[in-house]
Image (tube, grey):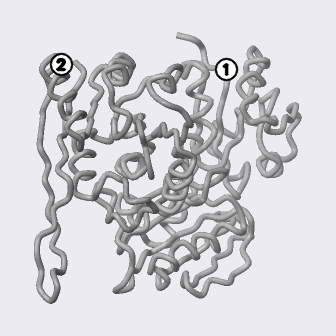
Amino acid sequence: MSEPWLHIVGIGEDGMDGLLPATRAIVEAAEVIVGGERHHQLAEGLNAERIAWPSPFDALIDLLRAHKGRRVVVLATGDPLWFSVGARIGRAIDPGEITYHPQLSAFQLAAARMGWSLPDVETLTVHGRPVEQMIAFIQPDARLLILTTGAATPAQIARFLSERGFGQSRMSVLANMGGKDEARFDGLAESWDHVVPPFNTLAVECLAAPDAALLPRVPGLADDLFRHDGTMTKQEVRAATLAKLMPMRGALLWDIGTGCGSVAVEWMRGARYARAIGIEPRADRRAMAAANALALGVPKLELIEGRVPGALAGLEAPDAVFIGGGLSEAVFEAAWAALRPLGRLVSNAVTLESEALLLELQKRHGGQLVKLQVHRAEPVGRLTGWRPLMPVTQWSLVKR
């Protein structure tokens, strides 16, 4: 196992004074210190060579490796492994070469200021990421702690809350926690007008109005929450489809024939960091899918123009595949070959021709065939009757 040569040190607003004596000694003995401008200001009076974050940031790993053999310290905010640079470095450099020195994180400090128990709070970051990611976490009575991108982020989040019927949600911006300039700003989402420091953490207590939009993380969002042209996997069938696809943390879905993106969007909402690639030949439907992903809090949905199976070549191997359009034997074979072990494949058919193909594929490969039939109550004159949706034949199987 390699000897540690790289120290990643969490530092707070109290600077060097807040470090443990052993950690402070490591920073003081460093030959090279890497960090942002703010980090360097918090660790003044040292003789080490100072290096700012590189641009582009991806060059950081090469920069660090170039200094291997010297005493190198990377300064990060709070806990370097909680939505911070330490995790990124640890994925690229052997962890045996790194020693981490955590400080209290912004989440811990914010929870203490709010009197909230961390296990009962959702912690998330939109720092340097699309702010829309937080939309998926807007739930009645949810408590959120959010690392923001800057001074404008709280107002953006206040707007998201208000547009969805959560305008009465209580918001607190906590800035410079643990330092001499610590400040707090409180208000309601619907009337938020504070001017806040650029480096801040946002606490939100979500309070729903009687007409608030309910957007659960479990599959089966209402059809009218999606922009679509009528051709989509409907709510009840979508819920059954996602149950067979089994969203998991960090897993990748190929949504073939993604249409308005309803399955891909719900897959990404269903598990933290779940990813999806939607393959769709029509530009208008890709535009709808992109709009739905943004509105429902999964802005990282990747959309690809192309026809299958050709468009599948070169894509990262998936953990799950949904064939909602473009079904053919060639498409199945390409998707099945790419699917990772224990991967899940689901295909839905509404035409007799597609159903016949699923029957043939099931004979050869096994799996489960299910006929889904949904009836919805709708007005019939002054009365009410059952109106059937098109029946769906669903084939699902797991790659062993």
**How many numbered marks, from 0 up?**
2
Placement of 322 over or under 296, stated as above or below: above
Q: Residue 122: which quarter of the image? A: bottom left
Outermost residue toward the top in this view: 1
For this view, does 350 lie left or right of residue 43?
left
Of badges 1 and 2, the one in the foreground is 2
Q: Position of residue 64 (x, y in %)?
A: 74, 24
**Is there a contact, CB below 8 Å, between mark 1 and mark 2?**
no
Element marked by disc 2: helix
For this view, does 121 lie left or right of residue 187?
left
Residue, disc 1: 5
Residue, disc 2: 365
Residue for point 18% across, 76% down: 378
Q: Position of residue 179 (x, y in %)?
A: 70, 64
Q: Closer to the camera, 1 or 190?
A: 190
Q: Which amino acid type is shown beneath numbered disc 1?
A: Trp
